[in-house]
Each structure stands twice: as structure tokens, then as C-alpha cells.
Image: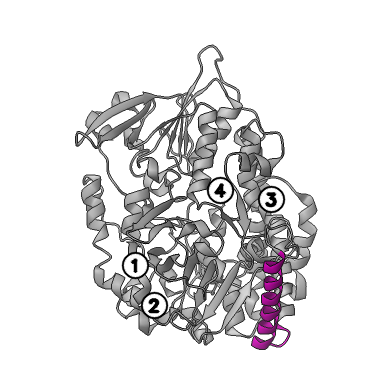
Amino acid sequence: VIRHPHAQSRLTMMAPSSPSRCGFRTPYYFLIQCAILLATFYTSQAFSANTAATTPGNKLKPTNSKNPQRVVIIGAGVGGLATAARVSSQLPNVEIIVLEKNDRNKLGGRCGSFDVKVDGVGNFRHERGPSLLLLKDEYELVFADCSDETTGDENAAKAYGLEMKQCIPAYQVIFEDGDTISLGFPRSKCSQGYSLEEIKQIQILEQESIAKFNSLEINGFQKWQEYLDTCAAFLDAGLPNFIEERLDLASLPAFLIEALREGGKRWPLQPHSSMLYSLFTSPKLLALASFQDLYVGLEPYANSRQFGGGVLRKSAPAVFGLLAALELHPSNDRAGVFAPIGGFRQVAESMHQLCLDRNVKFQFETSVTGCTDKGVHFITKNKKEGHTEKGFIAADLIICNADVPFATETITRPEISHEETLKDKESLYRETYDWNDKLDYSSGVIAFHWSTSQSVDALNTHNVFMSANTTCDAESSWAVLRGDATSVAQSSMKDRPFNFYVHRAGKTDASASPEGCDSIMVLVPCSTLARNKDMASMPREEAIEAYKQQFSADVVDDTRDAVLQRLSVLTGLENLKDAILHEVVDTPGTYADFYNVGAGVPFGLVTIFLHCKALFTHDFYGL
């Protein structure tokens, strides 16, 4: 969200498209998809040209060098930190102030860690947001572009304490029957910081993985490699042309060749499952090839009740297989799953220091309550004296890094944008919690953070537990993403298929837990918060407490029991409950409280194809 008082305001939002009923295997629909694909490509280039002044590598120019501008950035998440670093490096005379509602310990927003101290045992570090890092070169580029280091991108990041280690293998996948398989083995392992003995063990694990693929399906590993190669072509074209919005014609021939292979069986805009069914017959291989869709809030299976199988709403198009290539392809230059040494808080701490070196100012425990054409209104919490203080900062430019669905209904709502005509001045200092419920959201999450008295050696760094005994089970395991929260909530988790993720930080970074212990995070998809419009005008603390009640202790207990039951298929985890020294539980209510995310969803809006900002933008004036 960017607002400038001297120009017409513009807010780029992701907007859902209304579905209609139509078959998706007809030539007519195929032509429509071709038109959409071409329109997205060309409009993305046009949009990119119009916004070139704000992209990395282009120079911003102050309007008045004698009177430096003031830029206010709302939110000290990694997006706000990176923005502050880039603006300050290009406009060194501009005053930049970052306002963050949380205290200093929650720097980085969702990209952060927290500590649990267990008496007599030691300190356990847990991740509250992401637990794996992709595209590490993008992080390194921030430091190379914005610091005085001249020794290369990687060394610039390391100079600020940010070191990222590749996780090999990237994942372990565990099925309900105890079957396991490891994924993500880069061709070059010698440069990843592993010893010769560790490389030897990785090679053994890789051979076991190949044998497992072939046991699940005839020529299973060959089919898997072909699938990853197709996804790599989607990645090489999609990343520059559609995500980074820069023209890369050289990547398009390979993209089109893969898209049209075998009579269009790998066409990128069909439902992901349609492409997978043409490649695999094993339900387990189908599951392996599609679990990344959860990261963007989509299910891989076609929804027969929606136009195009649901690819315009909450079913992933096949092109999103690029996520598999991004994480798992053995030779793609951009591929790999990484872990920041010291936890994800280190990412934020390194960026914070970079900003301080660029003279960026920070105000923590400062909640922005309104943005107007004059500047930013906020309240600061004084914990010592137990009250809040009102404040105002005049600004030439406001960059809002807060969650968009939350921000548009609260701090940037149009009715408060023109301060001079506003009758209720006190509304500028009223802190509330609300969100735009007309948008499509990814799933909520119930998270368990366990500090254990034993080392959980059966787990890798990143583990995905999947239900795929049958194709029916595999499809049913994604029910929470179809929005049928009522039917899902009526049965116990133990009685239905579900997928979940487990992170074991100490496997890659021993500093995460005391020796012989482990820090474990479990993420279980769940329903989102249900919006109550009557709470929109309530004081924020009252609204948050009311929303937290939507996830009762019974729901949390049932989820925990189901997870422990599924974990017990691994050797040594039969009685994991007895080894849990300390537990922290997060629900959508927690995420809403900490990060002001709409619907309490840590993954944000679903990333559907038509959410591409080049195709659908909404203009709001007076922000």
C-alpha cells in the first residue's frame, strides 16, 4: 500500500474472480486460457514499465533536495525492513521512520523466533512464522545493494550475520502407513557446508529414495524427474516474466514446449491434479508432487462444481508446480530449501542492523490507527505507566507493509483519508481489528511448539505427513481448503484424513535446543476465523479476545491427539507426548493478535492465477 499526498493514490490488491459453470476440457476453454496467459504476460510487462521507478535497481529522486522528504513505513516485518533499506540507500537524505506495533522482541513480524527457557535444561528456540527459506539470493541481494560491502552478494549478507545453509534432503515425507521417502537432493553437494561423511550419508539416503520411487510405481523415479523438469521450465519462465515482471524471452520456448507436450497434458492452466493424473498412478506419488500447493492456500484437486475445475478460485493450476521445482529440482540455479543459522530472527536482526547503518529510525510498540493525506496517526503503549499516548507524524510518503485485507478496513479506510473534512477526529486514534471478508484466504493454522527432553532423530529438518492410502483419502485430506469448515469440525481429527508439517530446527542448526533435546514445530491446517461485522467497531483487544474463543481447548486437544497418533508411526516417537517439557500453542486468533492478519491466516490470501496484479488492480482514493 503506497500513498502520496501530491498524487492520486493507488492501492494494488489481489481480487478474486467470480466463478461460473463451464466445462474445462473444451477447445473453447483452452482458447480462453491461452488468451488469459498472453494477456497476463503482456500486461505484466506494461505494468512493470509503469512502476519501474520503484523496483530495485532504479533510482528514486527526491522532489526537493533542500527539504528532505519524510517516508513512514508501517510494519517492521521483512518486507518493511527491506523496503526501508532500499529507499534509504537510494535516497540517503530522506528521513525514514518505521512504525511497528509489537515490541522489539517481535522484530521481523511473521519472520521471527521466540525462546522458551526450561529450568534445569536450557534454552529452546522456536519459529513462529516460516521455517524454511527459498530464493536465498533475493535476501543476499538486499545486503549487496544497500550496504557498503563490495565482496559479493553472499559475503555482504554474511557481514551482517546472515548465513543460510541448504537443507539436504529438503524434505522427508511420511505417509499414514509409515512409508517414508526423502526429496530434494541437489547434484552439487560439496559446496553446501557438509562434511565428507555427511555427504556419504546423503548419497545413501538418495539411493534409498530412488528405490522407494520405483517401488511405488513402475519407473517412478524417471516420472518424478520428468515432472520436476516440466516444473523447472514453468519456474524459469514464471519467475522473471510473471513474478518479477521483467521480460525474459529466452525462457519462453522451453515453457511452451513443456506446456504443449503429449498433446497438452502438461498445460499449465489446467488443475494441478489433471496434469498429475497423466503422469502418475500411485496416490502417494500424486501427493508428493502436490503438497507445496498448501503454501499458497490452494488444493491440487479439480473442483467439479466450479468453472475450469476451480483454477480461478481455490484449486491450484498446474503451473504452480513451479513451487516443487523451486524447492526440489536437483540442478536448477534458483532451487533449494535453506535454513538461516540462528533461526529466522537472524534474518530480521541482520536487516535491522542494515537499516540502522542507513540511519533508518524505528518506533516499537507503536500501533498505527489511521493514515490521512497529512500523515500517520498512532498510539504508543507505555507499559511502565499502563496507558497509551496519541501521536502524529507528518509524511510525504507512506508505505504500508501491514496485511492488505486488514489495512484497507482499518488504518487506510477511505472515510478517514481526508483529515480536514473528518468530523470524528477521535476515530483517527481508535485501534480496531477487522478485515475484508470478500477475498479468498488460505487455510488457518493450529501450531504446536514443543520443547522435548529427547532428540527426535526420526525426523528430518522439514517433514510432511500426508494421507494418501487411497486417492479418495488424498483428496479428502484437503477438505479444509474447500471452506466446508462445519462438516470438518463435526468429526474428530483422528477419524479423517489430514496433512500436516513438522519442523525440527536442530537437525540443521544445533543452536536451536540443548544437547540431546529438540525444538519441534507442528503446523496443522484448520479453518480461518469467521468474521463478525459487529466486532469491527469494538476496541481491538476486546475483538481479538472474542475471536480467540472460536478455537476452543477441545479443538486444540483433539488436534494434538491426532498429530501424536500420526507421529507414532515413526520409530522412537511412539510415546513422544511423555517427552514434551513445554508447549506453546498458536491458533488463528493468536496470529491475528500478533500480526493483524486478516481472518487470522498466517499464509495470507490464496495465490490464485487471477490475483496477478497485472490483471486485476483496484484503485482507492484518498488513502
Task: Please name the amino acid that badge 2 sits on.
Answer: Leu
- Residue 491 is drawn in which quadrant? bottom left
Query: CB of mark 4 within 8 Å of CB of mark 3?
Result: no
Q: CA distance from mark 3 to mark 1?
A: 48 Å
Q: CA distance from mark 1 to mark 2?
A: 15 Å
- Please provide percent x and percent y for residue 49: 66, 38
Label 4 vs 2, first from the N-terminus: 2
Mark 1 or mark 4: which comes first in sequence? 1
Q: Is there any visible trace of residue 435 in the rendered image? A: no
Please give the residue where the numbered disc 2 appears in the rendered image.
564
Work out whether mark 2 precedes mark 3 in sequence or the reverse, and give the earlier one: 3
Q: Which residue is mark 3?
A: 241
Of tags 4 and 3, the one toward the viewer is 3
Please provide the residue range marked out in magenta.
Answer: 196-220
Which of 498/119 is in front?
A: 119
Give the prevailing secondary structure in the magenta stretch: helix
